[in-house]
Amino acid sequence: MFLRNEWYVAGFSREFVERPVQRWLLGEPLVLYRSTSGRAVILEDRCPHRGAPLSSGEVCGESLACGYHGFTFDPSGTCIHIPGMTTIPARARVRSYTVIERWGWVFVWMGDANRADESRLPDYHWLADPGWVGGSEYLQVKANYGYVRDNLLDLTHARYVHRKTLGTAAVTDHPIRTETYGRGVRVTREMPGIEPSPFFKRMGGFTGRVDHRQRIDFTPPCHVVINTRVSSVAGSGENRSAEFYVLNALTPENERSTHYFWGLMRNFALGDESVTETQQTLNRETFFEDLAILEQQQVLLDCKPVDWKPVAIRNDGGCILAERLMDKLLAAEHDKKEQK
């Protein structure tokens, strides 16, 4: 049960090279490559001849040749060459996916190519904005992408899971505000006059109390942008501020595994590479803490009793709204498919 007519991150631009790479998305085998002219291409990774992976072949100019019997496919998925044959069967083709490359990430439309809508592309412009600096990385999580989404929408867990990095006791003392907007869900938490977390003490140099705001935006099917703004409390004697964007693209590999593409961008110390290295290391360590919980959660929920239901609390508001939104969109897409 995945939304098909949406944009998903298939990989970083740096992964698209003149050597094919296999990646499973939404339970489907895809092959990623970059043509000689520099075009990012995504095809079905299953040759129509014997079902061999095209990713075991090689790039030939704009096209991709199967490594089993040499069937060659252009970026549209059309077979243009079969060794020893002059006539190519009409069925000798593979599916080609609509691709947009932007901000160093490559997005793929997994549904009907005729319905591909560039206006629905998620906004990750901070990755290429000269006023922001940072980096992007990849993490595979052996858990359903919905669990990863909920982990990001409810940052209350930071007090317990991330006590050495992002954790602050204030997250349980300050309520969240949830709302829907357009096609998304927003969660906001304002924490005025709190003790800064270890991360912001180290990254922003804060020593006194701070005003800390979290704003989390979820956009279907799997995009979460976290904006964190921290500033010295007025009259504290300090005059510091720091702002971060954590960019999260949670592309399902299948029902129990997620390709987690993330970026962390800041608006201060723009020319200091040591700060970038530190922020990436700390954020990576934070995600490893999440991974340990999420993968155990997947195992336990796989074997839950039939009548087991989660207990909902106030801070689940964003997770509940996001799940309702996804259920609505999935039902609508299923109904349209049934009507055809």
Image (cartoon, helix red, strand yellow):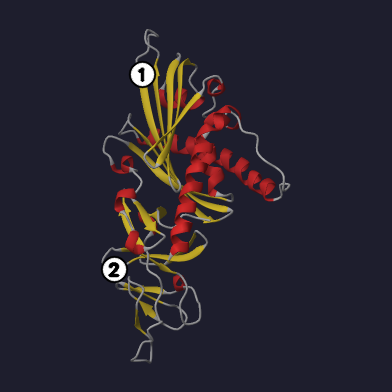
Res 70 label: none
- Residue closer to the observer: 194 or 202: 194
**Image location (x, y in percent) of residue 305:** 73, 47
Label 2 amino acid? Thr
**Image location (x, y in percent) of residue 129:** 28, 40
For label 2, the crowd category at 10 Å Cα-Cα, with few meaning under 14, some 14 to 19 and many 20 or more, is: some
Between the residue at mark 2 and the residue at mark 1, the CA separation in whole angstroms equals 48 Å
| 134 w.r.t. 231: above or below | below
How many callouts does the rendering have?
2
Label 1 amino acid? Arg
| 146 w.r.t. 228: above or below | below
Q: Secondary structure at mark 2?
A: loop
- In this rendering, position of residue 96 left or right of residue 29: left
- Residue closer to the observer: 120 or 200: 120
| 115 w.r.t. 68: above or below | above
Question: Where does label 1 land, which residue?
Answer: 240
Question: Where does label 2 land, which residue?
Answer: 36
Q: Secondary structure at mark 1?
A: loop
**Residue at x-position 31% and y-position 67%:** 35
- In this rendering, position of residue 161 left or right of residue 300: left
Q: Quadrant of residue 38?
A: bottom left
Q: Residue furthest front?
A: 339
Q: Is residue 131 visible?
A: yes
**Image location (x, y in percent) of residue 159:** 57, 27
**Image location (x, y in percent) of residue 340:** 43, 66
| 331 w.r.t. 78: above or below | above
Q: Is residue 285 visible?
A: no
Q: Are marks 2 and 1 in contact (CB under 8 Å)?
A: no
**Residue at x-position 40% and y-position 54%:** 6
**Residue at x-position 37% and y-position 10%:** 234
- Residue closer to the observer: 331 or 181: 331
Q: Specify which label sits upstream in the sequence, 2 or 1.
A: 2
